[in-house]
Amino acid sequence: MLSYFVRRPIFASVISIILVIGGGVFLMTLPIALYPRITPPTIHVTAVFTGANAEATAKTVAIPLEQQINGAPGMIYLASMSNNDGECDITVTFRIGYSLNAAAAEVLTRVNQALSQLPQTVQRSGVKVTKATRQQLAIVVLHGDKDHPFDQLFLSNWAETRVIKALKRVSGMGRVHNINKRIYAMRIWLDPLKMEAYGVDPQMVVNAVSAQNTQVVAGRLGGPPTDGHPPGYTLILSGQERLQHASEYDDIILRARPNGAVVRIKDVGHAELGAEDYTAGSEFSGLPAAAIQLYQVPGANAMQVMAGVRKTMQEAAQRFPPGMTYTITVDRTQMIRASIREVIKTLGMAIVLVIAVIFLFLQNWRATLIPSIAIPVALIGAFMPMALFGFSINTLSLLGLILAVGLVVDDAIVVVENVQRNIEDGKDPKQAAEQALSEVGEPVIATVLVLLALFVPVAFVPGLTGRFYNQFALTIAVAVALSGLVSLTLTPALCALLLKRSENRTQSRWWHKPVDWFNAGLERLKSANGRAIEWLSGHVWIAIAGLVAVVGAAILFLLIVPSGFIPIEDQGFFFVDVLLPKGATLGRTQAVERRVAGWIRRQEGVANTLSVSGQNDLTNVAGLQLGSIFPALKPWSQRSVSAGDLIADVRRHFADDPDAIIRANQPPPVPGLGALGGLTFEIEDRSGSGGRSLRQAADKFIAKVQQLKAVAHAEPTTESGMPELQLDVDRARAAQLGVSLSDLFTTIGTYTGSTFVNLFDRFGYEYHVYVESEASGRRTPKNLDSLTVLNADGRPVRLGSVVRTHFQTGPTAVWHYDTYPTIEVNVTDAPNASSGQVIAAIGKLAQNELGHQYALKWTDVAYQERKTGGYAPIIFALGVIMIFLVLAAQFESWLLPFVIILAVPMGVFGALLALWLRQLDLNIFAQVGLLILVGLAAKNSILLVTFSRRVRGNNEGIVKSAADGARLRLRPILMTSLAFTLGNVPLAIATGAGAHARIAIGTTVIGGMLTATVLVLLLNPVFYIVAERFRSRRGYADTGETEEDAKATADPA
């Protein structure tokens, strides 16, 4: 049956050609991403309670919505933030794999059920439910240069009117946000002293602007119906349009006397074209800028979205005024491109090394060419089922292909080596190929089935861990299945066509001497290995003791090698938070940010910085004392320092900064899963003790967390309280003086907070009109006391006579997690400590310190690690069990599969030893490497056992058959193992984007493969001998065992 393709080489070639063509076509359709879709679905619920502070918003908006949403099917946790602008933002996170559409529909239904419990103003403005992602894709920055600076007001409006609308139309684009936007507004600045002198109050200004800045539609003349005498024409009456210029607002009449005296706005203040908001700003490398955050739709292809963004910005830039330009910074797709490029480069290096190893052993270009052809056929052909499975070209699938390079040539090497050996024994190539298939066809099929049994079940593991394993496992399974097909069809056919009997050398070449030395060494190694097996067969207890020692060492290293989850990678940028003392002004914050950003830009490897003042962009909390800096780094090939090095430098340099707290952090390892790198947990108030008690308990706990050896930094991401000036109105005194409380608070609100009046038209767009006091009237609490409000008689009354003030502290925002008040804490693990150690240490500390009033809850990456980290032992156990069952069916034996499985701990020992020596943790990529080793170690053991059984079938003794089988298989086992090992060297020494993942998996498979190869060649034949003796206890006459063999295998003890 298998020899059919030896006689039909064209048919065998057509199969491989179809695989390559099909895979190449589907390759062009596959999307490109950093990881598969591994982020959990999230739904955002947003509402605005205008005029409310953080506490009021939390009580009247957040809590009713949370209570209704909580417990939605598939939900794993929900978090909310209510700030002093009356904004409530609730993020509902669902389990991985849950339908995003179903989640959105469920949340929307529950929000509608809660609407009746919300304030009327919130009901009128509506509650938005959006399918969103926390994954910021990039930031587009509009800016000028030193010779052509533009102010932020101009840039922000240009972005809002000319750029953002176009970006929203990009396919796959989700939210487009103008950070700290300054939109044009007509600002009417009032002088309180002049207002008092003219007897005018803010409400009069608001009323006058509202009345005189209107769009009047007057009607028409001569229109139907008529009275029978139509004029023969129709005239449309054009009325007054809304005011546009500041001078027109200055001329608005506030009061007119019969004697002709008129009070206008310009008498008590002035109007100017300004901005809606002055509480935030943005700078790009020291220049005013407008920054536009881009968020993709969940499930969209990031590379395609950014391609659309670049095309859109190139078109938009053609209409920029001279001197204005744009920069795309904090671009996550840069890492995707760089990481994929590095992985492809590693793949090419692996292929070259594998081919070099094959040539070294086979020493024949024809014999080297045949298994080399299996590489592109299996790898390119694998893209066809990858597309059918809905996979993408990402780090995991490409890593799977790199590891598959060594696997896909294994079967072809076994066939070619066997054919070549048969030719050297005197057979012609065609007969040699047919005999080779009869000899190695069974073990090739067995090894393919073993690897499929290992990887296919793993592909159905749920959760985040399962998503990491799924594409990796199925990619390798497909490549291995195709390599098995090629090795049984194309490979023997090519052997019959290309291989020839070696000829005697007619002349000496320079390479003959090292080749002869290598061959002689290989023969000596074969003899030494055979003698060692024969000796150990008489000292079985030594082999057993060696196996026990290996298993014990593997268990020891499993305990001492720290566990991990997803390594933190250099993503080409990082985050810096700036926190000034409570009550600091925006000017102070901007001054500190300029100093910090300037220092960062002077460091090696930094390309530019984007500074955002007036808010913490990561937590979305506004505050004049807050700021965020986004340093973007140069490409990996142009710098010698990593993002982690720069973060450490920033922390060290600004550790004792006198003006502010400066915190530098990595982005999250999985985009969209959290806002920061490291681990995040929540301290929940379960007893209702209040915000102050929660903050005190959290600060105390964070201080103890910081003292843990496994923790480098621990800091809250939620801000503490802000100073407030509490206003206490003497209602009785106000009534006596004829002051209306409504007029009182309107006056205060207009002077100190600005009041929206109506709209005006400019530049083809509508903008807002605001009334507010000039800066001199709202600088200090004394200014508040000196303000006046008109009483019922029109006489001014000073606010100080009816209002008392005192200082207090109020929250900048109120955070909830799973409906409980919470404080969020971000933790960075110390060098040589793993995330698993940090989670365990903090969990133990929480049990002793938090008590029953407070609870610790892990979120984002840490939540997923704790939830899915326990799947790894199940995955390995499942893999080993499946291999055992397939082998039992293959050999019709329960004992021989056990002998083969004994190779697994040999590989695990070497893998863990390598991780320990390189001070790496057992993260998810290292676990993937261990999974590969389970199959590879078993594969080599299968070859040994299969050939030993074949030799014994020729009526050889047990010991001789085991030793001869090991001699016969030593060269192909060494060849395949060395090819696989050297093919993974580029992974183990990787640098650049995504290097930590490649280093983890490369170190694991190299260390495990080295020990597994040596120990399997030496020990597994001995265990085969023990198993065969156990099976032949009834007597050795029917097994071919000799008396000499019996004596040699007897335990001397």
Image (tube, grey):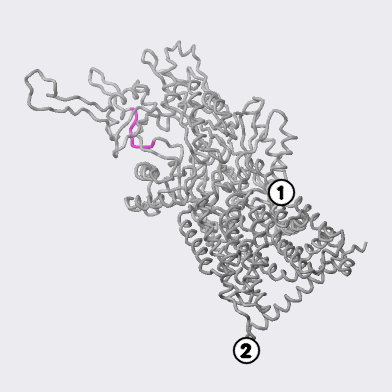
6 or 568: nearer the viewer: 6
Residue indicated by mark 1 = 877
The answer to whether any part of residue 733 appears in the image is yes
Q: Main secondary structure of the magenta part?
A: strand
Q: Is residue 694 above or below residue 457?
A: above
Asked if the stretch drawn in magenta spans residue 722, the answer is: no
Percent position of residue 566, x then y: 62, 49
What is the residue that sits farthest to the front in this orientation? 1038
Percent position of residue 779, x then y: 46, 31
Q: Which mark is residue 445?
A: none
Amino acid at pointer 2: Thr
Q: Is residue 740 above or below residue 998?
A: above
Quadrant for the N terminus, please.
bottom right
Q: Residues within 10 Å of mark 1 (few under 14, many from 20)?
A: few
Residue indicated by mark 2 = 506
Amino acid at pointer 1: Ala
**SS under mark 2:** loop
Spatial CA distance of label 1 from label 2 is 56 Å
Asked if the stretch drawn in magenta spans residue 271, the answer is: yes
Q: Are marks 1 and 2 in contact (CB under 8 Å)?
A: no
The answer to whether any part of residue 599 appears in the image is no
Residue interval drawn in magenta: 268-275
Percent position of residue 878, x then y: 69, 48
Quarter of the image where one finds residue 684: top right
At 19% from the left edge and 24% from the top edge, which residue is drawn? 219
Percent position of residue 768, x then y: 35, 32
Q: Is residue 899 above or below residue 781?
A: below
Quick one: label 1 or label 2, which is nearer the N terminus? 2
Quadrant for the C terminus, please.
bottom right
443 or 299: nearer the viewer: 443
